[in-house]
Image (spheres, helix red, strand yellow):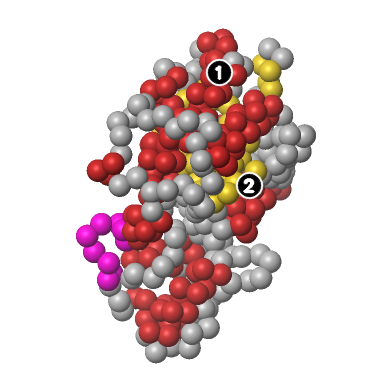
Amino acid sequence: MQLLRRGATGGAVADVRQMLATIGLLDNTDPAGADVFDAATELAVRHFQQNRGLSVDGVVGSDTYLALTGAHWRLGDRVLAHEAGQSLTGDDVTQLQTQLIELGYPLRRADGVFGLSTADALSRFQREYGLVPDGICGPATLRALRQLHRRVVGGRPQLLRDLVAVADSGPSLLGKRIVLDPGHGGDDPGVCAEGFVEAEITWDLVSRLEGRLSALGVRTWLTRGPGNGATDAQRAELANEVGADLVLSVHVDGFASPLANGIAAYYFGGGESSSSIGERLADLAQRELVARTQLLDNRIHGKGWTLLRLTRMPAVRIELGYLTNEHDRAMLVDPRFRDTVAEGLLVAVQRLYLPSADDPPTGVMRIPAAAG
């Protein structure tokens, strides 16, 4: 969709302002400015993005618009069901998924998308409660949900299930399935500075990581080739189709100020849901990379970006420094730095599966590139 920012006018802006007004973030009563993207609209958009774990830039792109369109739905406003080819999305779906998770049904996360897994979990609930197990959330199912309380106690229910699943998979990386996502590509080169291109850097780095993982018996898939690209939704769809255990997305950052620098890691989080194992992997990757590269630690953050939200498995996005910063750029274009990053990410993945008693301190573990 066309990006909407301050100064824009027209029907699309009017729709955005109306949605912001509906959820209480904007006074939209003045008809004279109903279709103008003014300073108040930008502030409301930033507030909404902050609450939803989106990039806080005050610009309405596809992720922000999709989140806005779903934000006004509350559980019970409409009948919810899985629709082949185009799943329902919205806050009401998130609320339903959250209730099912708290009741003990095996949903990986409350992502606000009514997919097959949500329909299956709902059907199981209906069957156990004596309802028609059609996977449709209508009035009878809503009444039943309102009469029940949480069955899982002692922590976040999904965290407990995720921890068990990781432990059950064993410490060996042999046979694990990992999707590697080199950011951007094709018509979208990403950040460009001083003749260096993000898409080329991420491709080279991911290729190094793929070789190390393959040597350990990990099955890997890449979301794009060296000369093409894909949308984040397409990348998530690939990961879901191959049944990956993890997704690692590699990016390079950029900013208008050349002073911005450092590494950050992102996992699915924000709003009412988050990926517990994604958060754990992001933390491991961030600490390993900071310890090995000495770049500034910009911490880990929960975000609702498309790739992180639509993948059914834990996904982590790494921003490996700022190509627009002289110091970071000198490191990013150095092949030795890329080898260091590849090793750090490999170690982070290995540590995710190690029992706590066998988990080594950050920055000391080494896995030879030719190990098998």
Q: What's the magenta bit mostly, secondary-structure-wise?
A: loop
Q: Secondary structure at mark 2?
A: strand
Badge 2 density bin: few <14, some 14–19, many ≥20, Cα 10 Å: some
Note whether 231 is above or below 145 in the view shown.
Answer: above
Which is more N-terminal, label 2 or label 1?
2
Q: Secondary structure at mark 1?
A: helix
Q: Which mark is residue 336?
A: 1
Q: Horizontal placement of 56 versus 147: left or right?
A: right
Q: Nearer the viewer, residue 358 or 15?
A: 358
Mark 2 and mark 1 in contact (Cβ < 8 Å)?
no
The residue located at (42%, 22%) in the rendering is 292
Question: x, y (%) of residue 341?
Answer: 51, 27
Q: Which residues are magenta?
A: 150-160
**Quarter location, residue 189:** top right
The answer to whether residue 167 is visible is yes
Q: Position of residue 221 (x, y in %)?
A: 63, 47
Residue shown at 49%/57% (left/top)?
111
Front-most of residues 55 and 217:
217
Which residue type does callout 2 highlight?
Trp
Q: Is residue 325 visible?
A: no
Which residue corresponds to the image point at 30% horizontal and 39% vertical from the top-left? Answer: 359
Identify the mark at residue 221; answer none if there is no mark.
Answer: 2
Q: Position of residue 295 (x, y in %)?
A: 44, 18
Between the C-alphas of marks 1 and 2, the distance is: 24 Å
Q: Is 46 located above or below residue 245 in the figure?
A: above
